[in-house]
Image (spheres, grey):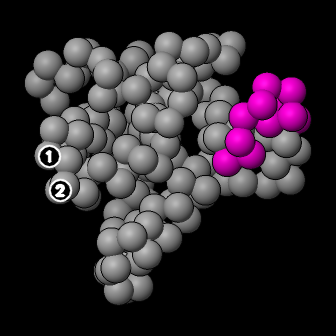
Amino acid sequence: MTERSTLLADGLCFLDTNILIYAIDDREPDRQTIALQLIDALAQSRKGVLSTQVLLELNANLTGKFKLNRHTAAMMTAAYADWIVIESDLALVLRAIARSTEQNHSIWDAMIIEAAIRAGATTLYSEDMQHGRRFGGLLMVNPFLTQ
């Protein structure tokens, strides 16, 4: 990553599904470039974190929105096998439900936030959540707004 390397935090960084989608979507080349640079930097630094939810959403988008065959989608999803992956379980779901209820997040966003917190991530990269908001030690960053 060139000037975008300043986006990387010191700790682990969690990626929401939309960042992975932009990396393969050539309809928005500026966002694609930023997403690819961020993913590359996180892969090289081994600071990237995903969740089983993110991987499932990626696979669903690859076969649905992008109309890729299931084999190709599976291979593209498996490309993240070396990343830290936080698994969804009952405890995570219950914490997400509580967060969704208390803070009015969608259950899907609450699951992402809880997975990032479980991982000990310091940054959650997402286009869909409030840029600059903090959840304890977790900072929301929209990499498409950051200069």
Decide whether residue 101 is among the magenta residues.
yes
Q: Quadrant of residue 33?
A: top left
Bounds of the magenta span?
A: 98-108
Q: Position of residue 106 (x, y in %)?
A: 71, 42
Q: Quadrant of residue 46?
A: top left
Decide whether residue 102 is among the magenta residues.
yes
Mark 1 is surrounded, within 10 Å at the Cα level, by few (under 14), some (14 to 19) or many (20 or more) other residues, namely few
Three-letter amino acid code of the residue under disc 1: Pro
Say which mark, if any, is on residue 26: 2
Going by the image, does 55 lie left or right of 78? Answer: right
Q: Residue at x 32, y 80 (%)?
A: 68
Three-letter amino acid code of the residue under disc 2: Asp
The residue nearer to you, when weighing 144 against 111, is 144
- How far apart are the two marked residues, 2 and 1, measured between alpha carbons? 5 Å
Mark 2 is surrounded, within 10 Å at the Cα level, by few (under 14), some (14 to 19) or many (20 or more) other residues, namely few
Which element type, helix, strand or loop, lies under badge 2? Answer: loop
Q: Position of residue 135 (x, y in %)?
A: 67, 18
Quadrant assignment for the N terminus: top left
Name above or below for residue 43 compared with residue 7.
below
Location of mark 1 (residue): 29
Q: Residue at x 45, y 62 (%)?
A: 58
